[in-house]
Amino acid sequence: MKTNLLFGAALIASLAVSAPSTNAKSAMDHNLKCLWMNTDVAPLHTSARQGVAVNGKFYLQNKDTQKIEIWDQTGKVGELDSGKGTNITRDDAGNIIVRTGEFNTNYNVNKGVRIISPTGETKDFEIAGIPAGRADFWGHVSGNVLSDEGGILYMGTQWQPNMIEVPIKNGAQDAANTYSYNFVPNEALKVGGTFTTTHLISNYGFDTESVSMLSPEVKLTNTTSGNGNSIYRLTLDDEGNWVPSGFYTTPNHNGCTGFEIFQLNGKKYIVYSSGSNNADGFTVAKLQVKATPANEDADKDVRVSTKYAESKEDGSDVLYKNNAFYGNHLNVEPASDNSVYIYQYVPNAYIAKYELTIEDSSVEGIEAENDVVVFGAEGKIVVKGETLANVYNTAGALVATGKGDIDCAAGLYIVKVGNKATKVVVK
């Protein structure tokens, strides 16, 4: 049994599948396959600067219409009420988190935040303790922001030397435990320790000991965009402060904002924007950390696969240069034992879905019996059959294993029984 999800407020439409632009030429490595691409989102341009993919659909935050537009390969299939902000992200449980406060205004003035669950319930709160300044994007949020345990949003604001840790529990900010860290820059990158509007800070439930941060200020990074092209790894020091402890190895990284760390059968990888600067290429690499942000010959050994920037038919240039405020947003969801889906939103260009297969990450599995049925229920996942089930969150981390009734917090999960995967919602 496969549960198909659509947020409760979404409107369904039947539209023709859109093909890639007729003057585009795609190229990617053999282990990466483009399942579909839709260029109809291009006119949204800077109105929808960030988007996030959940359960096969894209959720694009349109600050001008104050709606989250829902898109798939057929076109726009619905919308949800939001607000005038640009930031939109998801947590490990598949909850969407969107800023409803007015765009390009201080966070300490326009404070609205909305959480939308996989079943369509919404919770609103006003964020507190954020320094004055602008921040257009949010990174991945660890945990489940609608549960008692909660999740953590990390962010900065323009020109401020602080990284703010924002715990969110049961759909509301834990203001008492919100903390602002004085960011300590790594001199190897020669940054001033402040943040641009396009920075991105992420944290994942499978690695709560680390925070990944797209470099704050562009200085000597050989890019022309509004953000740096190296991704810091932050860890806690002996005094409990987040400090830089190296750089993720990301060969041929460009200046666009966009990356995600994910797991596939216990191994960690990173997908990030790469190739022609400010264009739409991306690369998947094994997750490794080194001391310098500089490109080195050994970096190529971590590369797993690359999707190259779309080019003109005559090969004279890349097709999408002006990607609307340096966005190349990437999300990952499990697909099978040795593959993942990669979702890409390039503002002013397209949305696309890919399948990446990594053969050396596969594990032996037992084909699920025909009578095995999997579905979500109140506070649990029900597996009817004798085969062992593995339960993963949307970031690909294993969260539970069992048969029969498997207790889980509310959220979106991928359940693998043998070689078959099923998406379910726990209420």
Image (cartoon, rainbow, N blue to C red):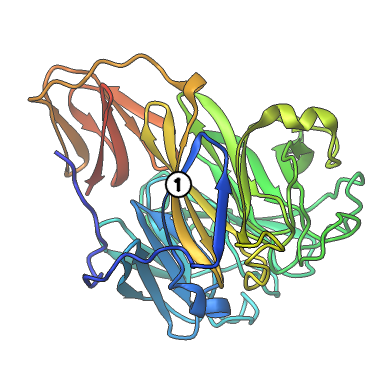
Q: Nearer the viewer, residue 367 or 205?
A: 367
Q: Using the image, determine if residue 269 lies above or below residue 139.
A: above
Residue 141 in view: no
- 148 sits to left or right of 276: left
Q: Position of residue 95 (x, y in %)?
A: 38, 55
Amino acid type indicated by mark 1: Tyr
Q: Residue at x 86, y 54 (%)?
A: 221
Q: Quadrant of the N terminus?
A: top left
Asked whether the viewer can see residue 378, the reply is yes
Hey, which residue is sitting farthest left in the picture?
371
From the viewer's perspective, tell me whether residue 105 is left or right of residue 118. right
Where is residue 9? Give x, y as percent.
Answer: 24, 71
Residue 45 sits above or below residue 191 on the image? below
SS assignment at label 1: strand
Q: Residue 122 appears in which quarter of the rendering? A: bottom left
Q: Residue at x 53, y 80 (%)?
A: 47
Q: Residues within 10 Å of mark 1 (few under 14, many from 20)?
A: some
Nearer to me, 290 or 407? 290
Query: Which residue is found at the position 70% from the left and 67% from the top?
Result: 157
Q: Which residue is mark 1?
A: 354
**In terms of depth relative to the viewer, which is nearer, 12 or 423?**
12
Residue 388: name its quadrant.
top left
